[in-house]
Image: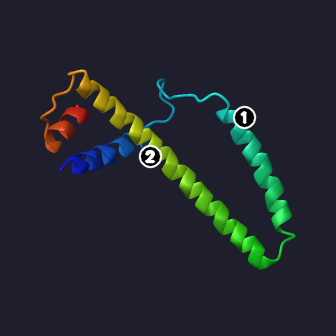
Amino acid sequence: MQNKIWEQVGQFLNQLRSEDVTRDTAVEVPGYKETQKEMEGLREKCEIMMQQLPQEQRQLLLEWMAKLEDMNSLEGQKAYCQGYVDCILLLSGMGLLRQDLSTEELMKWIRQ
């Protein structure tokens, strides 16, 4: 039962996360933009270098890079949702949320 609650909360939070990344409350992580620029430069250099590799090796690296991007995305989603779950648990532990909320009640309350 409890896992079902977190499943539904997770789905809702993923929808919320995807809606507006330009809002005033968006979090800025120090060093993110700089690292992003560095990654773009490295990607360009790697793409040039990969053209010199045999097709089999190039394909393996492309598959690895795609999986790495997928994993990074999933890790970001997991961290985002975990932060929300931790906030909900904190509020619940402080008595600011009822402990006996059903899944439906919790989702209705969150969507308000």
Q: Is residue 95 above or below residue 35?
A: above
Residue 79 in the figure: left or right of residue 52? left
Mark 1 → mark 2, Cα distance in angstroms: 23 Å
At a point 73% along the width and 46% down the height, the residue shown is 39
Residue marked by disc 1: 34
Identity of the amino acid at label 1? Answer: Glu
How many discs mark residues in the rendered view?
A: 2
Marks 1 and 2: CB-CB under 8 Å? no
Residue closest to the eye, 46 or 90:
90
At a point 35% along the width and 41% down the height, the residue shown is 13
Q: Earlier in the sequence, mark 1 or mark 2?
A: 1
Secondary structure under tag 1 reads helix
In percent of width and height, residue 7 lies at 29, 50
Residue 26 in the figure: left or right of residue 82? right
Residue marked by disc 2: 78
What is the crowding at mark 1: few (fewer than 14 residues within 10 Å), some, or many (at least 20)?
Answer: few
Q: Is residue 54 above or below residue 11?
A: below
What is the crowding at mark 2: few (fewer than 14 residues within 10 Å), some, or many (at least 20)?
Answer: few
In percent of width and height, residue 65 lies at 66, 61
Q: Which disc number belongs to residue 64?
A: none
Residue closest to the eye, 87 or 17:
87
